[in-house]
Image (cartoon, grey):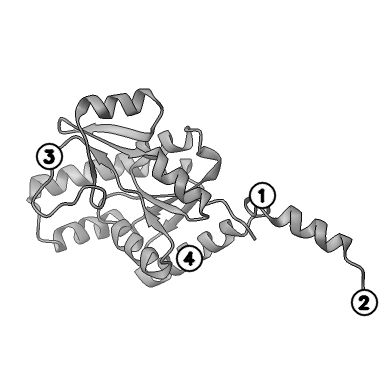
Amino acid sequence: MDRTGLLIILSSPSGAGKSTLARRLMDWDGDLRFSVSATTRPPRPGEIDGQHYYFTTPDMFRDMVADGQMLEHAEVFGNLYGSPRSPVEAAMRQGRDTLFDVDWQGGQQIRASALGGHVVSIFVLPPSLPELERRLRARGQDSDQVIAGRMQKSRSEISHWAEYDYVLVNEDLDGTEDRLRAILTAERLRRDRQAGLGRFVKRLMEEESA
């Protein structure tokens, strides 16, 4: 049966496991596409336009926003970032779901967009704040000052948990991945998301019994 693709928003505070879970979902379902962001920052060595980012100029980016061609956008450290609408719509028509790794602000914008009726939003919580801090320190990448800033931002992110359709506590990655798969499977099977279901039932009702 035909199905319209979903927009899957995955959010969490830094260190709660969102990026790892996103990669696992992509490995599980090869048809699931990751939303490629547009940005006005210059490409870094090895980055490919259309694969890592859509690289554009500030004027072109602002024109896309004005034309309603960005599902969400924000300015980060003087550069503009956003999620172009047209690749997502193309995937939806093919019955492919798009995964968004965005914060609560990006999630709000996508839900408020013209495609908001196709959104499934999931927030991932850490089992505790001390465990979240332990995970950040285990990376060995940030100074104490940076970690303190990330923890402060995490509290702000967590305060928006009730805006999401689903909230998962990531105590272990395997269990959380299983629950994510279950959510995605159930959402795909919702009656109002199976575009060909009405036609199928109509044919079924017209059939003669044996």
Q: Is residue 87 visible?
A: yes
Q: Residue at x 28, y 25 (%)?
A: 62
| Residue 182 image position (x, y, % from top left) | 52, 65
Nearer to the camera, 126 or 44: 44
Q: Residue at x 47, y 33 (%)?
A: 113
For the residues labelled 1 and 4, the Cα–Cα distance comes to: 19 Å
The crowd level at tag 3 (other Cα within 10 Å; few <14, some 14-19, many 20+) is few
Q: Earlier in the sequence, mark 4 or mark 3?
A: 3
For the residues labelled 4 and 2, the Cα–Cα distance comes to: 39 Å
Using the image, tell me which numbered label, if any, was put on residue 210. 2
The amino acid sitting under disc 2 is Ala
**Residue at which label 1 appears:** 192
Q: Earlier in the sequence, mark 1 or mark 4?
A: 4
The crowd level at tag 2 (other Cα within 10 Å; few <14, some 14-19, many 20+) is few
Q: Earlier in the sequence, mark 3 or mark 2?
A: 3
Q: Earlier in the sequence, mark 1 or mark 2?
A: 1
* SS type, badge 3: loop
The amino acid sitting under disc 1 is Asp
**Residue at which label 4 appears:** 181
- Compared across the picture, whether 205 is left or right of 168 comes to right
The amino acid sitting under disc 3 is Pro
* SS type, badge 4: helix
The amino acid sitting under disc 4 is Arg
| Residue 38 image position (x, y, % from top left) | 27, 40
**Residue at which label 3 appears:** 42
For the residues labelled 1 and 2, the Cα–Cα distance comes to: 30 Å
From this view, report whether residue 172 is shown above or below residue 108: below
Quarter of the picture containing the C terminus is bottom right
